[in-house]
Amino acid sequence: MGDINEIFETSRKTLQEIEQRLEMPRREFLQFCATLAVTMGLPTGAEAAVAKAIESAKRPSVIWLHFQECTGCSESLLRAEHPTLEKLILDVISLDYHETLMAAAGHQAEAARKSAMQANKGKYVLVVEGAIPTKSNGIYCKIGGQTAIDMVKEVAADAAAVIAIGSCASWGGMPSTISPLSDSSPTGSAGVAEVLGKPVVTIPGCPPNPYNFLATVVHFLTFGKLPEVDKLGRPKFAYSRLIHENCERRAHFDAGRFAMEFGDAGHRQGYCLYKLGCKGPETYANCSTLGFGDAGENNWPVGCGHPCIGCTEKGVGFQKPIHQVARMLNVTPPLQYPRIVEEQGKAASFASAAAVAAVAGAAAGAAIMLTRNLGLSHAAAEAERARDAGDAGKPTAAEDKAQV
Ligand code: SF4
């Protein structure tokens, strides 16, 4: 081990260089590394390895292909502020081909792609945004006279890693939606893994969270390999927990407090959106813990009052009707709830009942509580409607039922 002063001095110099290169204070740079390490679920202290990789590793060449998509994934990445995409392009990866962002066009652009592939053969990272149309030999998407099918196969052949960004590239997403009158989508849209016939890393989402993409690339830089993935190719650090498990409205769900209509009293008070069709209970993603766009807390669909549509989950997003209630994959309440402002009165008894179920920790008990609570808000809503109709003062049958 080298002299500690020497190590400190080297690190200080490197951080100074980083500070100048990224035009970012070193404290902010270290915070960025810590955020990525936490996103990847790495243990305390791993931010040093992440910082070292970003400081010293040779920037990997990235070829970014666009097919059937809206460019929302790139737009989402452009909203990542720490660092901005511009800094990311210049300092973390070498983005050698990206049709939306590159200055070159036409033959020059295609020549840039070919030369990047040749110069970095076997070492570059291929990122695919958008679904790939497979019907009629892929004629529905052509770039420079080449179909999307041929292009993705050609570029993937010599790539060190392939990442499908967004739901469209992951499994077909929105373009793969099938009408009830048909047995396939109009263009036969498919995901990258299906077209290549081999597994790839997928970062689904519409759009995906930019930090999940950045963390995947930085994992590759730090450890020389892509992160561990689930059976759908999604990095486990980002997609191993249900949105419902860490949702800020979860305490309302467990207490049986639901918004029944957009704009009703429950909706205005931030109650659970399950009955409006929230797919959080059957969708794996870290939206509820990470948020979007660096715009502060609660900046994600449920935080803004809209039910989760399950965009990261094949078979849920773009397939299930928005207001269809979700399938419950896990009925056990968490051991600890996010903090909420407790209401006084009858709601407190619902909360304490849910807390008893949580302490007991028995799935069967929790399922009974869940069934009971799901019925409670209907009864409460009925009672409220009856009161509004002028029966205030007299307890109604529905109110009696709600208080049981
Ligand atoms: Fe949050 Fe949706 Fe679960 Fe309600 S159903 S707690 S809004 S994820």
Image (tube, helix red, strand yellow):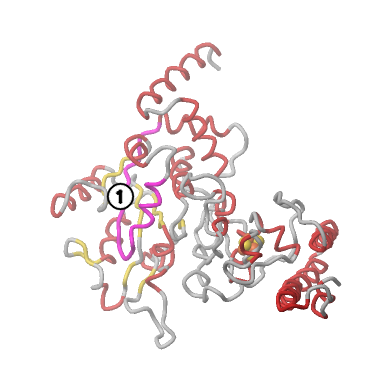
Q: Is residue 206 left or right of residue 120?
A: right
Q: In which image quadrant can residue 129 be found?
A: bottom left
Front residue of this view, candidates 380 and 1: 380
Is residue 190 depicted above or below 22 in this figure? below
The residue that appears at 38% across and 39% down in the rendered structure is: 84
In the drawing, does residue 179 fall left or right of residue 394? left
**Residue shown at the point (71%, 51%) measured from the top left:** 340
Question: Which residue occupies the foreground of this view, 275 or 214?
Answer: 275
Could you tell me residue 172's position as x and y percent? 40, 68
Task: Residue 66: say if magenta.
Answer: yes
Q: Is residue 400 magenta?
A: no
Question: On the rendered structure, is 7 left or right of 364?
Answer: left
Mark 1, secondary structure of its residue: strand
Q: Which residue in the protein does label 1 denote?
A: 63
Question: Which quarter of the rendering shows the N terminus?
Answer: top right
* Residue 15, horizontal then vertical, whole percent: 44, 22
Picture quarter containing residue 20?
Answer: top left
Which quadrant of the frame does ligand 1 lie within? bottom right
Q: Examine the rendered structure and indicate whether residue 119 appears above or below residue 365.
A: above
The x, y position of residue 85, in whole percent, is 36, 42
Residue at the bottom extreme, as displayed: 181
In depth, the one of 375 and 121 nearer the eye is: 375
Percent position of residue 126, x then y: 34, 52
Q: Which residues are magenta?
A: 57-79
Look at label 1 and name its amino acid: Ile
